[in-house]
Image (spheres, rainbow, N blue to C red):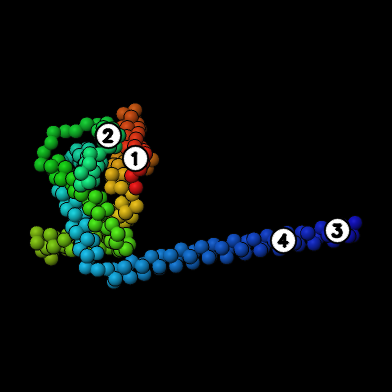
Amino acid sequence: MGRFGGAERRAGVGCELSDRQRRAGAGAGSRADLLSFHNDRCRHGNCRRRDLARSSGEDWAAGLTLGAILFSIFLTETWGIALTTATNAALIISLCTVFTPFLEYGLRGQLPLLGVILGAGTAVSGVVVLAGGMTALGAGDLFILGAAVLRAVMVVSTKRLMAGRALSSAALTTQQSLMVSGLALAVLLSQNGLSKLLVDAGFGFWGAVGFLSLFCTIGAFYIQNAAVRRTTPTRVSLLMGTEPLFGFALAWLLLSEPATATTLVGAGLIVGGTLWAVVVERRHGQC
């Protein structure tokens, strides 16, 4: 019994030491993960600065050109939404999913795959159902239509201008942001002067502006730049066309807006049409 009790105590001590070692190892692993994440962020920032410093004139020309296209999208969308309804804007802007394959394939002297066009059309019809139809067209709708065309131009141009370039997507997004900021400042000063640069607003307003700028604009376009360089513009445009679906889902989840049979049908058409078009393109060996 004494020998058994001693063995039991030694086993208990061993288990306790083992637990302590595991906890220490887990803590060290967590600290290592945090340090690794911090170092990755630092390397990412250093890489972006190094890329910008090493960028050639052609790299800057390509990045600033894409930035000018991006600014044109923002400008036409802003003017358009001020002159039309949110429903019309959501429906018309989704047409970029149809314009993109025609532009991409047309520049190669080809027609888009039939399945891609049918899938894109199905997704657009889902947006129509989700939004509940369109009202009469006006000047604002033409601006939104122009923005849809520019979105198609944007993704196709990014793929073509960045082909074979070592410039990182982070550096490209920085160049675009500089161009957009410069052009926006120039337009603001030309229309309103220096006095309009001062905005009397509270923390809530600036917090919302910061969130929208960092996550919904800079972050979103960084992801788009990275995605376009790894796949086809058509596929990126199709996936971007699911934006109304996420708007509906978040409105239902966060704002408690009702999910009716009509909205569910529209969401199903968007998902089904997008998946159909993406699968068709993949089966035909697109990169």
Residue under the image location 25 percent in, 50 percent down: 155
Answer few, some or many: residues within 10 Å of disc 4's Cα (few below 14, many 20 plus, some between 14 and 19): few
* Circles 2 and 1 in contact, beta carbons < 8 Å: no
Query: Viewer-nearest of labels 2 and 1?
Result: 1
Give the residue at mark 3.
5
Give the residue at mark 1.
284
Element under disc 3: helix
* Label disc, if present, on residue 16 of the rendered structure: 4
Where on the picture, by quarter, is residue 194?
bottom left
Query: Viewer-nearest of labels 3 and 2?
Result: 2
For badge 2, the amino acid type reads Leu
* Circles 3 and 2 in contact, beta carbons < 8 Å: no
In the image, 130 versus 202, the foreground residue is 130
In the image, 178 versus 276, the foreground residue is 276
Mark 2 and mark 1: Cα distance apart in space:
11 Å
The image position of residue 122, as x and y in percent, is: 28, 32
Give the residue at mark 2.
114
Q: Does residue 80 show up? A: no
Mark 3 and mark 2: Cα distance apart in space:
78 Å
Upstream in the sequence, badge 4 or badge 1? 4
